[in-house]
């Protein structure tokens, strides 16, 4: 959640990449790190994300004070759902990575609906952006079919297409997610919210220790 340091005035936002296993969350994070020239930390990687991917980006300023974006990806495995929900609860905006191939798109939609339900029960609005990944694969669904699957009577999500393995569309989706989070923070401040009450994680190690308690 957004946090303004009483000591420095710095605003920290959290953007979370969500999605099913192997949809491309970690690939997206590493492509983003190349774009932003920032290092990704993946504690206990071993081929799959068991905790999270972590990237910190200094994104300029907000109302004249420093703006820092903590970027995380969640573990997709269902047996790690408690960790996943803890990280989702931290989000100021969510980029949901969809595996848009015909074989796996239904799994992505099922995960997406569960994530929406969790976020909507969290008591505060969290913008969600859909990153339709793997658009280079031959059996990727046409955009019109994806829109029909993911956009219905719920609030219409923002949608970007990507090929995370090549970096295509990754930065654009990230910038949009940051913009959405900043807009929500400004609305909160305009409504009198005190964002200096709370906690921010200062390192990947600190967050990992917290997740190990779950």
Image: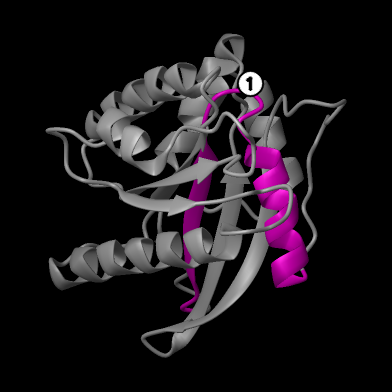
Q: Is residue 146 left or right of residue 87?
A: left
Dot 1, how many residues are within 10 Å of its Cα: few (below 14), some (14-19), or many (20+)?
Answer: few
* Quadrant assignment, res 49: top right
Looking at this view, name the residue that lies furthest to the front.
Answer: 138
Find disc 1 in the rendering and name its residue.
213
Colouring scheme applied when the structure was drawn: one colour
* Quadrant assignment, res 146: top left
Q: Is residue 35 visible?
A: yes
Q: How many marks?
A: 1
User: Compared with residue 213, is residue 4 higher up or lower down, i.e. above or below?
Assistant: below
| Residue at point 30%, 28% (across, down) | 149
| Residue 35 lies within the magenta run | yes
Q: Is residue 119 left or right of residue 40?
A: left
| Residue at point 46%, 78% (across, down) | 9
| Residue 176 lies within the magenta run | no
Q: Work out which quarter of the rendered image holds the C terminus and state it.
A: top right
Spot occupied by residue 120 in the image (x, y as percentages of width and height)? 23, 33
Q: Secondary structure at mark 1?
A: loop
Of the pair 149 and 177, the residue shown nearer to us: 149
Spot occupied by residue 116 in the image (x, y as percentages of width and height)? 30, 30
| Residue at point 16%, 35% (across, down) | 154
| Residue at point 56%, 51% (across, down) | 162
Of the pair 207 and 168, the residue shown nearer to us: 168
Of the pair 134 and 29, the residue shown nearer to us: 134
Looking at this view, name the residue that lies furthest to the right.
Answer: 46
Q: Magenta stretch: give its range.
A: 9-37
Spot occupied by residue 73 in the image (x, y as percentages of width and height)? 60, 40
* Quadrant assignment, res 79: top right
Q: Is residue 66 left or right of residue 73?
A: left
């Amino acid at each position: 959640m957004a946090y303004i340091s009483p000591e420095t005035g710095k605003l920290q936002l959290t953007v979370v990449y969500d999605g099913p296993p192997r949809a491309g969350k970690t690939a997206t994070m590493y492509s983003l790190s190349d774009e932003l020239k920032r290092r990704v930390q993946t504690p206990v990687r071993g081929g799959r994300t068991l905790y999270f991917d972590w990237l910190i980006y200094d994104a300029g300023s907000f109302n004249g004070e420093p703006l820092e974006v903590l970027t995380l990806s969640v573990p997709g495995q269902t047996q790690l759902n408690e960790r996943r929900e803890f990280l989702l609860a931290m989000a100021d905006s969510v980029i949901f990575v969809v595996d848009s191939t015909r074989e796996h798109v239904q799994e992505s939609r099922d995960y997406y609906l569960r994530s929406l339900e969790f976020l909507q029960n969290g008591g505060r609005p969290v913008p969600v952006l859909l990153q339709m990944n793997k658009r280079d694969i031959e059996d990727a669904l046409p955009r019109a079919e994806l829109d029909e699957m993911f956009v219905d009577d719920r609030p219409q999500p923002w949608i970007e297409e990507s090929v995370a393995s090549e970096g295509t569309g990754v930065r654009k989706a990230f910038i949009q997610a940051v913009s959405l989070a900043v807009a929500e923070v400004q609305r909160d401040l305009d409504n009198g919210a005190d964002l200096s009450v709370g906690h921010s994680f200062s390192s990947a190690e600190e967050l990992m220790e917290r997740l190990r308690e779950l």
